[in-house]
Image (cartoon, rainbow, N blue to C red):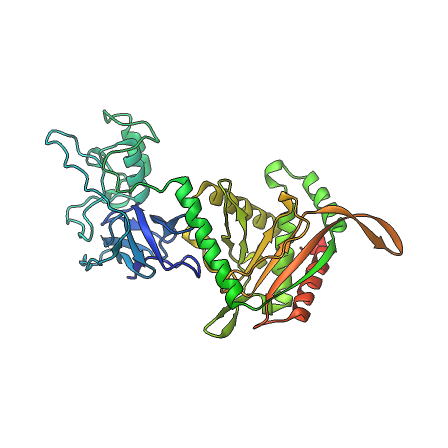
Amino acid sequence: MGDLRMPTLGADMTAGTLLEWHVAPGDAVHRGDIVATVDTDKAEIDIETFDDGVVDALVVEPGTRVPVGTVLATLRADGEVPRMAAPVAPEPAVAVPAPPPPAPSAAPVVSAPPVAAAAPAHRRRVSPLARRVAADLGVDLAAVTGTGPAGAITRVDVERATTTVPGTTVPGTTVPGRAAVERRSADERLASLRAAVAALMARSKREIPHYTVQRTIDLTAALDWLDAYNAGQPPARRLLPAALLLRAVALAAHDVPEVNGTYEDDTFHPAPDVTLGVAISLRQGGVIAPAIPNADALALPDLMSDLRELTARARRGVLRGTDLGGATLTVTSLGDQGADLVCGVIFPPQVALVGFGRIAERPVAVNGMLGARRTVIATLAGDHRVSDGHRGSLLLASLDHHLQEPDAL
């Protein structure tokens, strides 16, 4: 089985701090399960596993800062003999005092097991979700009867036990012994985020030979189609103009592939699919650009749903590891803030960035007649090592073309 490692969550990330484990040795995990939370310069990130298996050992303690690629935990196949993982010697970033030992008469509580210790042979099978719910509710798992496969304890078992186990706490309260470290304050996090973004943008301007082109796009047809579509949808299913713009960018990137990919090791690596980074302003300040994978393959309603969920996670500060890293082209829009024009800076190692200003009525000549039309000013910042103003202009022309045919989006 593979090991769980500190992931790289962007070109500017070199290390991260483990904040909390959501699993323990002996837990069965499945692809997509959230197993840990790590702190980066930009955000707290929930880390998912990409393999099915059993947690063999936790190698890194909460509160420890380790380089990207460091083994955080070892996994084994279900039924495989447990193996001991050699603990790493990471660079400590946060001093985490050891919790005081419990009083002899105290009832047992759910807590993280010792780091790098293999699961005891008599360990009961407990799903990660059941373990978290038990910790949140203060339920002693030793007193819970499992009804899952092979007697595994499930979330339903834990919730059922709250009606019979005395001393349970209400959901949302802190449970003593939880394996987590103190989070940074909002001011500290904002300062770290701004410093990380500033360093990345300084690198971009220093290393990437930028060029910028712009085009005013008539959105009358697209917005008329959008109004008609939304009229027949419940509020939760209605589309925002942003969905049309993102979809058109994803399609245009196929027409001009030089804007979609990364530049690394002096070589351009075109991407077969379009993973759109979306610049999102955070309520406490700062900006982050999580990604929507395979945006070119998503229908408009699905793209809108993914955009809503991604924005909500970013602003709640609960991004997932899969939300960061892997973007092949980024889109930024400052229209909601009232800016007519945005000339963006490329996110390395990407090679282009598309910007949109506000949608507004502007004077436009159509068939020799001057009138007010709803338009947006689109810009492209491109990397001269990969493309040029001619190709960049073709990208904007393709973007305009797709927005004039909203039925095909």
Q: Nearer the viewer, residue 341 or 288?
A: 341
Q: Quadrant of residue 90?
A: bottom left
The image shows residue 357, relative to residue 271, as above or below, that is above
Please state the horizontal and vertical placement of residue 181, each as a whole percent of the image. Answer: 29, 42
Q: Nearer the viewer, residue 319 or 346?
A: 346
Tally of numbered tags: 0
Q: With 330 as the anchor, is 363 left or right in this view?
A: right
Please state the horizontal and vertical placement of residue 290, each as a whole percent of the image. Answer: 49, 52
Q: Nearer the viewer, residue 290 or 27?
A: 290
Q: Is residue 271 visible?
A: no
Please state the horizontal and vertical placement of residue 58, each as a whole percent of the image. Answer: 24, 52
Q: Quadrant of residue 367?
A: bottom right
Q: Is residue 113 visible?
A: yes
Q: Quadrant of the N terminus?
A: bottom left
Q: Nearer the viewer, residue 244 or 376?
A: 376
Q: Which residue, as the protein is rendered here, is positioned at the far right?
A: 368
Residue at image coords 58%, 55%:
331
Residue at image coords 56%, 73%:
385
Please state the horizontal and vertical placement of residue 341, each as a whole percent of the image. Answer: 67, 52
Q: Quadrant of the C terminus?
A: bottom right
Q: Which residue, as the protein is rendered here, is positioned at the far bottom?
A: 266
